Image (tube, grey):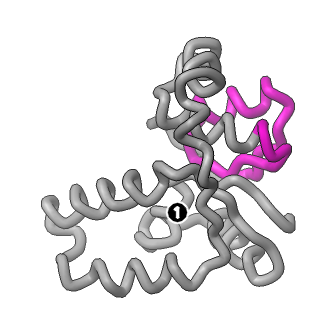
Amino acid sequence: MMAFVLDCSVTMAWIFPDEATESTNQLRESLIEGKAFVPSLWPVEVGNVLLIATRRGRITRGDWPRIHAILDALPIEIDPISTSRVWNVALELATEHQLSVYDATYLELAVRLHLPLATLDRRLSAAGRSEGLAIPTCTSREQ
């Protein structure tokens, strides 16, 4: 796989070893020759997960710079126009597939770029498949 849309659930599997699977590790390794695309809400969503993990004692504030450096070193491109698509396409996709607007933003990006959607979320995976997207096997979970 050369390029794909990356959602927050797969990103966190790269950060937290207990959430990783062979499939999520293979996706990360595919970035050696590929690229991941994320909507502009991705850094906010990742930051929120890190904040919650810190509050729960899973990581410390001292881990934040290391995690940022790890993610910053990967070829992840933040889509500059995804938030402008919320009011039309993303809301429609969210309604049609019973997704959150957050998840629909990842779906919208994958549909617009005609790229596979890497997610661990079963509902988002199903929505992507119904939109004709390739969904890499990541060992889905319900979220």
Amino acid on which disc 1 is placed: Thr
Position of residue 106 measured from the top left corner of the image (x, y, whole percent): 61, 42
- Where, by quadrant of the figure, is residue 107 drawn? top right
Q: Which residue is rendered at x = 58% and y = 47% of the image?
A: 120
Element type at marker 1? helix
Quarter that holds the N terminus = bottom right
Position of residue 68 measured from the top left corner of the image (x, y, whole percent): 40, 78
33 in relation to 25, above or below: below
Tell me, yes or no, whether the highlighted magenta stretch contains residue 133: yes
Position of residue 126 measured from the top left corner of the image (x, y, whole percent): 69, 29
Tell me, yes or no, whether the highlighted magenta stretch contains residue 26: no
Of 121 and 95, which appears nearest the observer?
A: 95
Q: Which residue is rendered at x = 15% and y = 67% of the image?
A: 57
Q: What stretch is highlighted in magenta?
A: 111-137
49 in relation to 20, above or below: above
* Side of 64 relative to 13 (left or right): left
Q: Name the residue under label 1.
A: 11
Position of residue 143 measured from the top left corner of the image (x, y, whole percent): 44, 36
- Where, by quadrant of the figure, is residue 24 drawn? bottom right
Of 25 and 30, which appears nearest the observer?
A: 30
Q: How crowded is mark 1: few (under 14 residues within 10 Å), some or many (20 or more)?
A: many
Of 3 and 125, which appears nearest the observer?
A: 3
Q: How many labels does the image show?
A: 1
